[in-house]
Image (tube, rainbow, N blue to C red):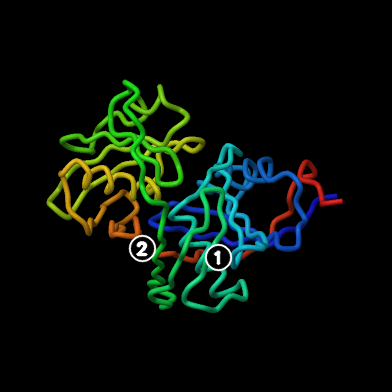
Amino acid sequence: MSLRVAVAKMHGARNDFVLIDERAPRITDYPSFARWICDRRGGIGADGLLVVLPSQNADARMRIFNADGSEAEMCGNGMRCFARWLYERGGLHRERMTIETAAGPIACAVISDDPLRFMVEVRVSEPTFPQPDGAGGVAVSTGNPHRVHFVEAVEGYDLAGLAGPAPQVNVHIAQVLADHALRVRHFERGVGETPACGTGIAASAAAAIRMGRARSPVRVEVPGGTVDVVWDEHGLVIRGEAAYIFDTEVDAPQAVERAR
């Protein structure tokens, strides 16, 4: 028998996700479910799967699975969607919340609950800059591993070719527009090129600030929209929209079993 599952479809800067509430667990194989539900022909279609879980140390726990079933440590755009779902439908109607992730606890704040422009602020991990490994670009960690390459223009650049030799990291190309503005494209591990990558936006801004190419705050233009990044004494903050698309129910395939 198939398993009927309630899902929500959301996006942050057109980086789209399917979200499921597993605070009462029903699914045992999240990677398989992610591969199926994220398939744009055989499922609903998304860049990733967000799983809502209970937490003993925070308001909720988020697990994020890429479209290929691999698990990521954190996701900035997904976190904004996660926070909106908790605020509107998840029984946590408060402006500030803390979410447990594999990258550590993440503080979120709802700064506008206008349904047409729901805005969330996410404080991501303090950026670190690993030693160069000869692969080029600027290595940055914002909870996830990133490599940022600065280019004259992002349009027409062979991003897939640049990212190919480094499948274990998220690769970004960044164009400096002004002291407080970047234009960025993203190639995410386990997904491919996406309209936006939240932690990658933060990493690109951090790299630009560290190298003296930009100053905080930074407005980052991506194919899916714009996201603002602030680097203050407490770390990196990303601010952007979280858009709701629809709620529905799906019949999961037999390969995704009920929890015993």
Q: Which mark is residue 246?
A: 1
Rate crowding at label 2 as few (under 14), some (14 to 19) or many (20 or more) other CA atoms within 10 Å: many
Q: Residue furthest left?
A: 178
Q: Residue furthest front?
A: 233
- The answer to whether residue 236 is left or right of residue 85 is left
Q: Amino acid at mark 2?
A: Gly
Which residue is label 2 attached to? Answer: 240
- The answer to whether residue 187 is left or right of residue 1 is left
Q: Amino acid at mark 1?
A: Phe
Rate crowding at label 1 as few (under 14), some (14 to 19) or many (20 or more) other CA atoms within 10 Å: few
Query: Quarter-wise, where is residue 65 in the image?
Result: top right
Image coordinates for residue 94, horizontal then vertical, percent: 52, 78
Q: Could you tell me how many numbered marks the image carries?
A: 2
| Residues tagged 2 and 1 counted as in contact (Cβ below 8 A) | no
- The answer to whether residue 23 is left or right of residue 184 is right
**Residue at point 49%, 62% (across, down):** 81
Query: Quarter-wise, where is residue 69 in the image?
Result: top right
Mark 1: secondary structure = strand
Image coordinates for residue 128, horizontal then vertical, percent: 36, 42
Which residue is at the front of the view, 64 or 16?
Answer: 64
**Residue at point 15%, 44% (across, down):** 212
Q: Nearer the viewer, mark 2 or mark 1?
A: 2
Which residue is at the front of the view, 140 or 165?
Answer: 140
Q: CA distance from mark 2 to mark 1?
A: 19 Å
Against 26, residue 34 (above or below) is above
**Residue at point 60%, 51% (across, down):** 63
Image coordinates for residue 28, horizontal then vertical, percent: 76, 47
Image coordinates for residue 162, horizontal then vertical, percent: 33, 26
**Residue at point 38%, 49% (across, down):** 196
